[in-house]
Amino acid sequence: MSKSFTPKVVTANDLLKGDVIYQTATGWTRDLADAEILTDEAHADLRLIEGSQQIADVVGVYLMDVALDGTAPQTTHFREAFRAKGPSNYVHGKQEVA
Amino acid sequence: MTILVTDTGFTADTWDQGYTPFGEAANDVVSIDVPADTNPADIKITPTLKMVRIDFPSFADGRGFTIARMLRLAGYTGRLRAYGHVISDQYAMARRTGFDEVEIHQDLAARQPQEQWKFRSDWKDNDYQDRMRG
Amino acid sequence: MYTYNDFDKSFIATRNAQFRDQVERRIDGSLTEDEFKPLRLMNGLYLQLHAYMLRVAIPYGTLNGGQMRQLAFIADKWDKGYGHFTTRQNIQYNWPELRDVPDMLDALAKVGMHAIQTSGNTIRNVTADHFAGASADEIADPRPVAELIRQWSTDHPEFQFMPRKFKIAITGSPNDRAVTRAHDIGLRMVEKDGEAGFEVIVGGGLGRTPMIGKVITDFLPQEDLLPYLESVVSVWNQIGRRDNKYKARIKITVHEHGIEEIRRLVDERFAIVKGSFSGIDQVRLAEYKTHFAAPDFVVKSEAVFKDAYHSDPIFRSWADTNLSAHKADGYSIVSISIKKHGDTPGDATSDQMRLMADLAEAYGHNELRISHEQNVILPHVHKSDLPALHAALKEQGLATANIGLISDIIACPGMDYCALATARSIPIAQEIATRFDDLKLEHDIGNLKIKISGCINACGHHHVGHIGILGLDRAGVENYQVTLGGDHTETAKIGDRAGRGFEAHELVPAIERVVDTYLALRTDKDEEFIETYRRLGLAPFKAALYPEAQADAA
């Protein structure tokens, strides 16, 4: 039996700034809360391809798992939690401006 | 069609005698196509050999640079050509290891026009190997 | 110290202009990301979890006050006011933006520094004994040779797209402080019948398949060094595996072909390559030796030192722990701990860097070193200056007396920064250091090296730690494996894996049980942890790590 598809978000790093970004319906955002939630596998694959083609703006595009807390996406793996927040030894990265 | 790159930029390919695959080369072969996994010691340098074309299956595969260097150290003085996925940033490396020229495909030439290759036609300058070898 | 000549300056300026151009060509689409990546890596630029990271070479760990001050300037101008010293004698900046990097490289060039080949499938920054030129136990200063290798390997046209990275370390002392047996090539300076040469060790490395290097030649004459190195790297560039990056390092090539076959291939190639060197490199080497001439050591009274040592217990504790024997009378080698309890191992703020630069100029013949243990060394300080130096270090939180102790931990950046990491390293190091500081036990425990890596690639050298810790991702939870009895010195040994891993909250108590076992079992205070371990083996420590297994067996 194939595994059921879990919600996903397309994520990458910004080419110029290097920071973590997430795909929205119209572009990219630095805030996971604003990301486009992908619940259909075929649509997710399509959005991944579309994101990967934007080589002038982004680097290292991939699909990450999210859990849905109401409508807001939450990270499910600690690696993505660090990417969404910043390092644990200093208040740097996204948590710095939050 | 392919594009030939030399120190003067993009030029027409003047070599019209084709290439014999490395494994099929006889003793009187004039030109050979050498795959990247070739042991340079197995390339027989004969008086008739005038052209060696070494394949770069990917720009990230630098075996061709070692083959070229070893061929030159073994005394080969004919034409030596790098062929395939070589990017303009590698032009100086190719020339310094003994290649005379680079043969690239058109799509790469469109993405990296000749100014980007001529930018490294200064490959004789700023070479630490000169200082170390004399 | 080596100072750049016109050639070096012209080379760096041109190289930086090329990289500036490559950045713009990446942005305009002339270069794909796949093509740009190795180019940025060979210029020291990574893309990590949260941002780009620029890794700057401190060749063979040596720099002067002006260079250290420039590192501080760069940290303030383009980063967040700090830098991270690494196990390969580099400094890393964690937060640059892509378009700032060419400016950062130009700022480095102003003080004769660069980031070339600190990454990528190239010959990396050559590392050396951080006590070179100062230590009492040294045969010869390895740094002139290291500089020769730096120049030979820099932009070497044959070796920019190799199967994988290639690391060279060199030591001039029989007491190996450069981990030479865990490098792709390790060089030990030796003498035979009055002639200077090298023992060449090949195929060492940590990572997924840890291996202690094998001796490929026990005596290589000094003048054969560059052609021999070139032959080794050339053979490997040709036959090293490119189908699997985990099998690409030369340690696997040596393992698969056997050291005898590799030696035969290298000797065969050497016979051809040797003729392409005219011998001019030896003329340059002789010149570089003059760059590294010992400073003019002064002779003066040590009374101030002796007074402070007897009257000030804090100074005495620091002096007992952080000083090493110097070859010159009246001098000491000072290790400045970048491991204050609870801080990030190897991180120095720009203020701390500026202070160390000032102190090097005032008291240290304008020399600093970065050690692979992520500390900063002032190699030449007269004992009479130590009390003033110590007082100044205290002001900036740099006077921690813990060199070689349990809180002097090597830790890679781990998942707090690194895109390859599988777990965090830094918080583990912080917790261990804080815990043993609270217990006030570390001086009693004595010499004990803890080394932490946040993934199998082993940048934190966990395999050769007395206690090694490897962070893994076990079903989405950080999990830490413990190895015991590793050794990074001339008696190098890969540690023994103790058993199942620990979750983060279980780890510090587990380490404490290992240490308690040592304290209970050592013959006396002079028997160090590693000696007790060698005497008794893994069993008693394993029992302490896994008491539940004992209970089950009972």
Image (tube, rainbow, N blue to C red):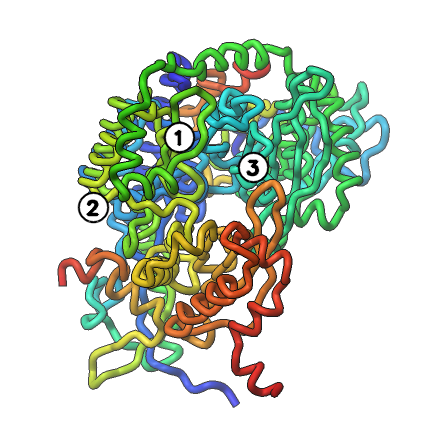
Viewer-side residue, C425 vs C100? C425
Q: Residue C192 at x, y = what percent?
A: 71, 21
Q: Residue C354 at x, y = what percent?
A: 22, 32
Q: Earlier in the sequence, mark 3 or mark 2?
A: 2
Numbered disc 1: secondary structure: strand
> Tag 3, which chain?
C
Label 2: how many residues lie within 10 Å, few (<14), some (14-19) or many (20+)?
A: some
Same subunit, tags 3 and 2? yes
Query: Mark number for residue C83?
Result: none
Q: Nearer the viewer, mark 1 or mark 3?
A: 1
Tag 1 residue:
C333
Tag 3 residue:
C176
Mark 3 and mark 2: Cα distance apart in space: 35 Å
Q: Residue C461 at x, y = what percent?
A: 50, 51
Above or below — where is C8 with respect to C540? Answer: above
Q: Residue at x 57, y 14 (%)?
A: C281
Identify the amino acid type marked 2: Lys
Identify the amino acid type marked 1: Ile
